[in-house]
Image (cartoon, rainbow, N blue to C red):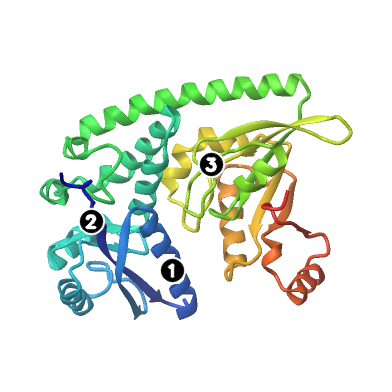
């Protein structure tokens, strides 16, 4: 009797650009993060390419010579999909796919794909589909044949191939329908917040870069068992739990989707119903992975999203998580740099 069928992971090439004043170390760290995203989407990274040039080529992003070299490398390493670390224009996407002869996706499409994998509730699935359709709409022109060639795999989840191949009118109609459904969700959430406000129950929102440990901290604070993992974007649907303080006062703690550098604007807009929980909170706890080598960049990315959703004026406390991974000297330096820093290890209850 044959055993269970094992699905082969797609073999992926990652492509990044060191443009302008960007430094190689920053570009390499960004490509490392892209590798984590690719793994979360089910791909196996077999090739990494970093190209230095003053600015992206408007036609092929990398320049025709580098694209030809990329095509040869993809053939040698049997690559299935090429993932670019920046958002490509529709024209670049089509031109590169034609020259490389492989499925081409960009960072935005990859993140959308992961969100489609993680979404569990109807609300979450609707928000992801809305973001995907808005991203794909301008890319449908002349892309019908290319989309039909893609088959399955990463970058093709969510709305589904048949929807992607429909005309613009039907896509816009679907966007309109989803938008109305999400508006209903926003109204329901607003009503819930109004009831909490009338009951004088303070709300605290946990935010943080993806995989910073905020859901672990959420579980510790509220004695919950929400799913946690080292994988990216495990939490999509907002969780709200009650917390009783030592003086018997009660408050509500919410856990929301993790942020990431260059979080797609379409995704931020689509998840506005969810992220309004942050903007309307009485206090934000920004959970920071203190051991991350690019901690400052991650903190800046979180602040940028907070600004986008109108939450930048909400009182905020920074919580440095994973402090058990610091040496005594590193911990002392952190306290010297930020005397008000709260240093915790969410795993230690």
Q: Check residue 32 in the rendering and tell me which mark sits there, or answer none.
A: 1
| Mark sitting earlier along the chain (2/3) | 2
**Residue picked out by circle 2:** 8
Residue nearer the viewer, 243 or 2: 2
Please indicate whether residue 90 sits to the left or right of residue 308 in the image: left
Q: Position of residue 89 (x, y in %)?
A: 28, 57
- Callouts 1 and 2 close, C-beta under 8 Å: no
Residue nearer the viewer, 298 or 33: 33
Q: How many marks?
A: 3
Q: Position of residue 148 (x, y in %)?
A: 13, 46
**Residue picked out by circle 3:** 227
Please indicate whether residue 113 sits to the left or right of residue 295 in the image: left
Q: Where is residue 141 in the image (x, y as percent from the top left)?
A: 18, 46
Q: What element carries label 1?
A: helix
Q: Check the image and report above or below for 62 versus 340.
A: below
Mark 3 crowd level (few <14, some 14–19, many ≥20, 10 Å Cα): few
Q: How far apart are marks 1 and 2 (CA)?
A: 22 Å
Q: Is mark 2 on a helix, strand or loop?
A: loop
């Amino acid at each position: 009797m044959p055993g269970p069928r094992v699905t082969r992971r797609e073999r992926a090439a990652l492509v990044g650009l060191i443009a302008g004043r960007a430094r190689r170390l920053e570009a390499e760290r960004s490509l490392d993060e892209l590798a984590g995203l690719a793994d979360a989407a089910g791909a196996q990274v077999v090739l990494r390419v970093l190209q230095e040039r003053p600015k992206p080529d408007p036609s092929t992003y990398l320049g025709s010579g580098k694209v030809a070299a990329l095509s040869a490398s993809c053939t040698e390493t049997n690559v299935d999909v090429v993932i670019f670390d920046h958002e490509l224009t529709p024209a670049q996407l089509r031109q590169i796919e034609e020259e490389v002869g492989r499925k081409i996706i960009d960072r935005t499409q990859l993140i959308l794909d992961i969100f489609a994998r993680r979404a569990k509730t109807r609300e979450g699935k609707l928000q992801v589909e809305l973001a995907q359709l808005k991203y794909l709409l301008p890319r449908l022109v002349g892309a019908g044949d290319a989309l039909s060639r893609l088959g399955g795999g990463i970058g093709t989840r969510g709305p589904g191939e048949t929807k992607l191949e429909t005309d613009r009118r039907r896509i816009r109609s679907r966007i309109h329908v989803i938008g109305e459904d999400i508006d209903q969700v926003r109204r329901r959430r607003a009503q819930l917040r109004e009831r909490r406000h009338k009951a004088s129950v303070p709300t605290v929102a946990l935010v943080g870069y993806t995989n910073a440990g905020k859901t672990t901290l959420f579980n510790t604070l509220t004695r919950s068992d929400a799913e946690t993992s080292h994988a990216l974007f495990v939490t999509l649907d907002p969780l709200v739990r009650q917390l009783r303080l030592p003086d018997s006062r009660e408050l509500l703690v919410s856990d929301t989707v993790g942020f990431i550098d260059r979080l797609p604007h379409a995704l931020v807009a689509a998840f506005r119903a969810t992220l309004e929980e942050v903007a309307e909170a009485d206090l934000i706890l920004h959970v920071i992975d203190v051991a991350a080598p690019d901690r400052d960049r991650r903190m800046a990315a979180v602040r940028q999203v907070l600004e986008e959703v109108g939450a930048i004026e909400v009182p905020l406390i920074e919580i440095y998580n994973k402090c058990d991974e610091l040496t005594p000297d590193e911990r002392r330096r952190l306290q010297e740099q930020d005397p008000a820093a709260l240093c915790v290890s969410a795993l230690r209850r």
